[in-house]
Image: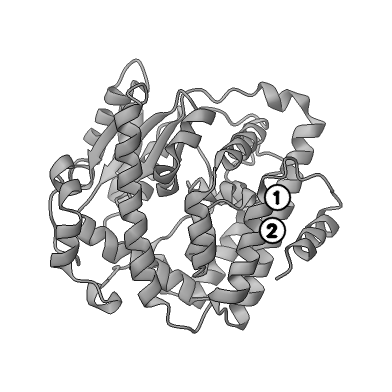
Amino acid sequence: MDHEQLIAEARALTGLDDFGADGFREGLSVYCASVSSEARLNELGAIAVRANIVSNLANRLRIVDWASAHPDVADERLDAPLVVIGMFRAGTTFLSYLLEQDVRNRALLRWEAGDSVPPPTPSSFRVGPRVEAARLGNDMLEQLNPRLRAIHHEEPDGPTECIAVMSQDFKSLSWEAISNVPTYGEWLLKVDQRSAYEYHRLALQVLQNGGVRGRWTLKSPHHALNLEALTAVYPDARLVLLHRDPVVLCASVCSLIYTLSGTFTDADHRAYIAEHWVKMLEESIRRIDAFRSTHSEHPMVDVQYEDLVRDPIGAVESIYSSAGAYGDDRLDPSTRGAMTAYVAAHPKDSAGVHRYDLAEFGLDAAQLRERFSDYVDRYRVPSNPPGR
């Protein structure tokens, strides 16, 4: 994959030329080279990854063009977003859907993250051709790989992860999730990601320029690896960190990556997946602890997965109270009712049962428990059997 050719394709597709800041180019170049030499894509994967790259570049062109043509975008305020920063596979998606039930909040929706211009108006926020196009794309992927629905399902008009936008700066875990690219993965852990967060902020300003506003509720385990860049761009962000038994987290994230990337390759990458994604969890913990030790001005709200599942509404109220999200931390009857209805309509495993096995990836529960013992002790994380 030649990155300059892909850039040319995006320009031809949109009729636009200006990508804004050049910070995306290095990541695009590294990723294309890493995909070509390491990912071992099958025929479907080669087509899908190429199309995904061009689509991300095209959306970036449209966002930059909209901001240039509408100077008032720069005046859009993004005050004190509530940012769920991880852990991997610890209930961040469930929490993001709960927070979306509060009408005061503004989630980043799946469809708009990749098809942002024109920005949605209140009447087109959840309906219209772009929403249905995203639904069709989602359905096609789940038909190709039915296991994905049980493992990680997102509605096109529901919340998605910030990496769906940051991928347009080519500094995003989303690129690693669809293809096994060791060189890009090593580069991503070392590179300064400030440009990705600055682009993320511009994208959110454009998206709310259509009139759909509120306190942004954002989420991605990617943030745990880049807290310095996140808080530099969003200095008043309220940070929320979910905790879950790391043995379960390791099994679940390896299963997710193997299933998703396996749609696009016929090669067996399980050994790499086990090594890399367990290391990513370790690195997330290390960077979170380092950040907390030096940035008391950015406190985090710690939430146990067990508490979130046992009492979802109470967990949200605790987050609001600890984060100072709203003056009245108790949920009003309407919001409480909406959250309660969402929980009742989406019981655990309603989309299917996600089964995973450490042994499939050559991992041992006892060794992992020892490896993460400091984390478990420090945060008092309850232990669960991996298949729960």
* Left or right side of 159 for 45: right
Q: Quadrant of the N terminus?
A: bottom right
Q: Residues within 10 Å of mark 1 (few under 14, many from 20)?
A: many
Kind of residue at disc 2: Ser
* Residue located beneath label 2 in the image: 55
Q: Quadrant of the C terminus?
A: bottom left
Describe the element under mark 2 as helix, strand or loop: helix
Kind of residue at disc 1: Asn
Circles 1 and 2: CB atoms closer than 8 Å: yes
Percent x, y of residue 278: 32, 61
Q: Nearer the viewer, residue 38 or 127?
A: 38
Q: Residue 46: name its quadrant.
A: bottom right
Percent x, y of residue 36: 63, 74
Reply above or below: 153 against 240: below
Reply above or below: 326 against 63: above
Q: Residue at x 49, y 67 (%)?
A: 182
Residue 342 appears in the picture as rendered? no
Q: Residue 41: name its quadrant.
A: bottom right
Measured Cα–Cα span from mark 1 to mark 2: 6 Å
Reply above or below: 244 against 272: above
- Mark number, residue 300: none
* Residue located beneath label 1 in the image: 59
Percent x, y of residue 135: 57, 60
Percent x, y of residue 261: 48, 71
